[in-house]
Image (spheres, rainbow, N blue to C red):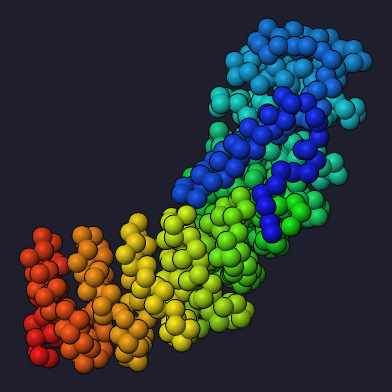
Amino acid sequence: MWRLNKVRHKAGGHANSLEELRTKRREKERALRQARRDRQLVSKRLLLNEDEEQDTMEVAPGEQDVVTLFQILQHGGTEKEAFLRPLSKALRDPSAQLTFIKLENSMHLLVGLLTGSDARCRLQAVRCLHELSHSPHTSVASACLPATPYLLTYLSGQSTKFTELCLYTLGNICPDSERVKERLLAQGVIPALAGCIQNHRHNLAVVEAAGFALFQLLQSKDAAQKVIPTVLASSLPSQLLSVLTPDPDFGLAPAIECAWCLHSLTSSSEDHRELLAQGALRQCCSLLVSLGGAVADGNTDQGLELLVCPLLRCVGNLLSSCPAEALHSQLGGVDLVAPLCELVVALLHTLPALAKETAWVLNNLTAHSTESCSALLTLNLVPRLLELLPFSQGINTMVLRVLANVAHKKKEFCVRLAELGLLSALTATLKMADQNVVTLSLEVLFMIIVSCPQIAEQFVSHGGLSVLEAIQYNSDGEVRRRATYLLEQHILTEK
């Protein structure tokens, strides 16, 4: 099955210290991706330099070393590459980064080397820029602006390593300054990224880096007005969707980056006609079902849940904006109901936050589709949902909403819900301390009793009368009024 691998070309080198550095950085990147599950996260990435162990010049990072190396490079010579290598290492020091950008003509020097004829110097110059882009100081990002037109131009190149460095450098400087983002947009970063993915569509390392850079752009405060319309008008949405086919050998990372980009697009507004027209719902659902099956079968490959999360959010958002009459054609024959139920159960104990999100998607699906509600009943999935009602963290409230959707659709569904054990489950949830659970339970009970008055007698036989009478002493006034109304207008009148 799939796994969250490191990029292939980053695997070079055998020194223990370099391998430890790789491990720590891979762990950090996984942690950053994982943090996105609960919130939007702007992060920076630092690519490993696998050639560092070949360096023969010993230079300890520091402000003075940066000044010395700059002066040597400034005064020319034919061995500039030999001094650019230690400069990139020295620029990992945050104080050295500030010292460097304050040196007169320092960025002009780097840009000159970046655009020069020596390919080796170009590579080392972009490494220096990449180190600067990783700076914690926001002023450094603005200092890198003179290089951005050339970084964008080089995205059409063929070198994987060079293109990756350009992409991660662009992605790193995006979060630090609105001025930088505006300049990049004006310089054509969106079509440049689209062209890059198109040219390197078979190079997953570059695709992953392009997804990262795009995600950074999509996190700006005014992205909905300034970035997303341009993205939707480009070829990027279809390209992002095409990446949602994880490579068994390479890993999940490119699909994860692109899925988070799609999540940003689907979260930007309620109008997703462009994405729906390109088959986004069908593509996301198809992969979600595949991954959900792997999780339900006990697959615990690291990173699997990091792809499931944005896919769930994409599907949930797209379902909420998809016209009910178009839902069947948009799903393209993908059966979501059973896989979603299996996924909720599979994630319940290990990843309850994702279990809740899965139940939310099921809620959005059943709210739109009578067919999906019918599938819950005919496939005998309701008992599995009822088993989830004792679980908190928002899972039981989402399950109650799903049951309310089913009850709302047809009288026959209400009768079937009662036959499958809903009434005894409601007598339990009505006793819970969570007021949201009690309120939703009263709503579901009201719907099925109004739809089929005979169910009131069954509810009383399950001990429901005493439960409702106890709720009349509840501290929440609205809950008391609902319970009293049910008793007086529907329960006691049926006795």
Seen in the picture, residue 308 relative to 60 is either above or below; the reply is: below
Residue in the picture at 72% in, 24% down: 17
Question: So how many labels did they put on this image?
Answer: 0
Seen in the picture, residue 405 relative to 123 is either above or below; the reply is: below
Q: Is residue 129 visible?
A: no
- In the image, 455 versus 61, the foreground residue is 455
Coordinates of residue 123 in the picture (x, y in percent): 82, 30
Horizontal side, residue 33 vs residue 403: left or right: right
Residue in the picture at 20% in, 60% down: 433
Coordinates of residue 488 in the picture (x, y in percent): 8, 82
Horizontal side, residue 94 vs residue 349: left or right: right
In the rendered image, the quadrant that contains the N terminus is bottom right
Coordinates of residue 284 in the picture (x, y in percent): 60, 66
Horizontal side, residue 372 vs residue 74: left or right: left
Seen in the picture, residue 417 relative to 296 is either above or below; the reply is: below
Residue in the picture at 81% in, 46% down: 156
In the rendered image, the quadrant that contains the C terminus is bottom left
Residue in the picture at 72% in, 30% down: 19
Seen in the picture, residue 479 relative to 155 is either above or below; the reply is: below
Q: Is residue 24 visible?
A: yes
Coordinates of residue 208 in the picture (x, y in percent): 70, 48
- In the image, 466 versus 150, the foreground residue is 466
The quarter holding residue 119 reads top right
The quarter holding residue 46 reads top right
The quarter holding residue 394 reads bottom left
